[in-house]
Image (tube, helix red, strand yellow):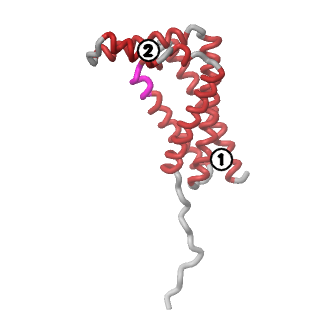
Amino acid sequence: MDKSALISKLSLKNGFMLAAVSIVLSLTLHFIDPVLVYTSFIAQVGIFVLFIALLVVVGINIRKEIGGFWTFGEAFKAFLIISLILALTATLYNVVLMKLIDPDLPAKAAAAIGDAQRAMMEKFGMASEQIDEAMAKAGNMQEKLEPTFKNIFTSFGVSLALYGVLSLILSAILKKKQPVVFDSFPKEA
């Protein structure tokens, strides 16, 4: 198997593995507290850091399995395949979650987000009128969370763009050139 095909195969395998981890983690957090990922900054940062660490580990493992060296382009291809799988499965998972598993989640999450935003603004000493105005400007959060075609398409696009940027960064960090080996050393005259 050539190097490019091996990279694709390993990327697909690892992408589906990371997607499964993502779904299990999301379901676990959902059953602990359905609105936790919408209202807890610490949970959001923790999940983000965990997935960056997992992507780095996966990238290093793929690089090892293909011989220990890869170019920026080969690394980017691997991370882009993984990113596409993650974005697609996350989008599909969210549709299933909000349509079948917990159809009331958009309303619950919107209410929790609104309460959290209101509490934060009160903490900063904003007047009630200012808070109401800011909440009105933010728009209807439930509409933004409902799994409509527009929201699904937007969510997929944003996920893919963020994963694309992350892929560029990780590819630049994890690329590793193969050292040049000389067949013979120059002879001294």
Residue drawn at 58 percent across, 23 percent down = 23
Q: Which residues are magenta?
A: 40-46
Count of numbered circles on the image: 2
> Which one is nearer the viewer's eye here, 131 or 85?
131
Q: Position of residue 76 (x, y in %)?
A: 58, 47
Asked if residue 14 lies left or right of residue 109, the reply is right
**Residue 132 figure quarter:** top left
- Dot 2 lies on which element? helix
Q: Residue furthest left?
A: 125
Q: Which residue is mark 2?
A: 136
- Three-letter amino acid code at the position of disc 2: Ala
Residue drawn at 64 percent across, 34 percent down = 85
For the question of whether residue 40 can be seen, the reply is: yes
**Residue 178 figure quarter:** bottom right
Residue drawn at 66 percent across, 38 percent down = 12
Q: Which residue is mark 1?
A: 7
Q: Position of residue 95 (x, y in %)?
A: 63, 19
Q: Residues within 10 Å of mark 2 (few under 14, many from 20)?
A: few
Q: Is residue 159 above or below residue 92?
A: below
Q: Residue furthest right?
A: 1
- Three-letter amino acid code at the position of disc 1: Ile
Q: Position of residue 112 (x, y in %)?
A: 44, 11
Asked if residue 99 lies left or right of residue 172, the reply is right
Q: Position of residue 139 (x, y in %)?
A: 48, 17
